[in-house]
Image: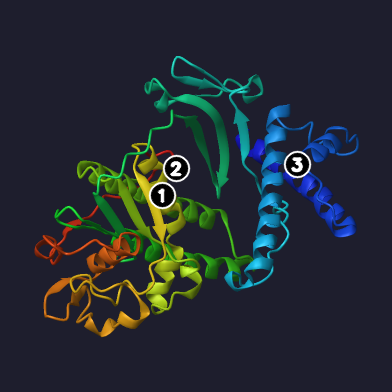
Amino acid sequence: MLREFCHRSKNLYNHGNYLIRQTFIEDGKWLRYGEVDRLLKADAEYPDYREMPTAQTAQQTLRLLDKNWASFFAAIKDWKAHPEKYKGRPKLPKYKPKNGYFPLVLTNQNCKLKDGVIRFPRVFQGFTVKAIFASQPDAVFNQARIIPHGGEIDLELVYELPEVEEKADNGKYAAIDIGVDNLAALAWNTGERPVLLKGTPLKSVNQYYNKQMAKRRSICELMNGRHSSKRIARLTAKRNRKVEDYLHKASRKVIDLCAEQDVSVLVVGKNKGWKQKANLGRRVNQSFVQLPFARFLQMLQYKAESIGMKVVLTEESYTSGTSFLDGEAPTKDRYDKSRRVYRGLFQANDGRKINADVNGAYQIMRKVFPNVNADGIEGVALRPAVVALSMSARCGSGCA
């Protein structure tokens, strides 16, 4: 039932996308949501709109389509102003595969929360789900999203919480250097011991996934000349669940540790296009490209906001080859990566040593707060605490 509804959502998406594309190609005009909704609702030949579970779900699908086109036009505008940021001209929103699926969104007009249970419309044949968030007295249910992933379906429940007032700057800062072997190197200016959150569980998941994918694709090509199968779809879905689970746990750990230190500002290093330009060797690149760092950043941001902590994103150029202990600014003229004496260790000019990822985290902090110094820090930065989180075999995207 749910899969069939998602297939109908795809049909409606493609029908609407056809109308918008043809209007844009032929007349250069953007057919907006309201007009597309009117045309499809009145279409007597194709029943895509009427076959949706409710009128509101049809409208939500078309709103998502309109949002994709809005992103396209925003990308075109930015591409014209800054073409160097792109590999090429942004392309028109594509059609979904003929036998594919598209998310189905139900608002709180369709789904009702009562006694901690969300009840779906009658057409869903009595389908209900327990809402864990209902235990929070200030939580307001917003919408339910039915999202197909390979051979499985995820259900996302979206709820709103009151905005938390942002903390005043108390001079206590933390910074994160994101990587592969260490997913996050977390450093503070409070004199507390830095923390390394291991990324090796994610690497292991990707390595197993890549090995199995190569094997399964080879079998598919020999058997029927195809590159995919239900087994491959299940394998991908399981890999994605494990990665999502680990990123949720890691981001929660980071925010909890920052809260313990009463941190008011968290600085996170981010480089645009890092997945395109990474040159870390074939094996490392494979792991690097497949780790959804943007999703990790998103988790950090909304979890920090929930406790009033400010998150600042900054580019991380020259942070790995400049010395925090020597008070160097992370600039090109100071950059000398030869001081990374061996894997995981950075040596200052006077011979003092510091964990290389921790050095990078402190230099990321210095990008935003140039006056941060090493007083009281050098004694703890050499041997950071190492945290390895467990990874669940099955977990949806609703983890906190």
- Seen from the viewer's position, the closer of residues 153 and 145 is 145
Q: Which mark is residue 244?
A: 1
- Percent of width and height locating residue 363: 28, 67
Q: CA gap, disc 1 to disc 3?
A: 29 Å
> Would you name the residue on which mark 2 appears?
397
| Mark 1 in CB contact with mark 3 (< 8 angstroms) | no
Type of amino acid at the residue the image marks with label 1: Glu
Type of amino acid at the residue the image marks with label 2: Ser
Q: Residues within 10 Å of mark 2 (few under 14, many from 20)?
A: some
Q: Seen from this angle, which residue lies furthest bottom?
A: 338
- Percent of width and height locating residue 228: 59, 61
Type of amino acid at the residue the image marks with label 3: Leu
| Mark 1 in CB contact with mark 2 (< 8 angstroms) | yes
Q: Quadrant of residue 2?
A: top right
- Seen from the viewer's position, the closer of residues 43 and 3 is 43
Check the image and report above or below for 295 versus 44: below
Disc 2 is placed on an element classified as: loop
Check the image and report above or below for 110 versus 173: above
Q: Seen from this angle, which residue lies furthest left?
A: 379
Check the image and report above or below for 213 versus 48: below
> Would you name the residue on which mark 3 appears?
12
Which quadrant is home to the N terminus?
top right
Is residue 357 among the parts visible in the rendering? yes
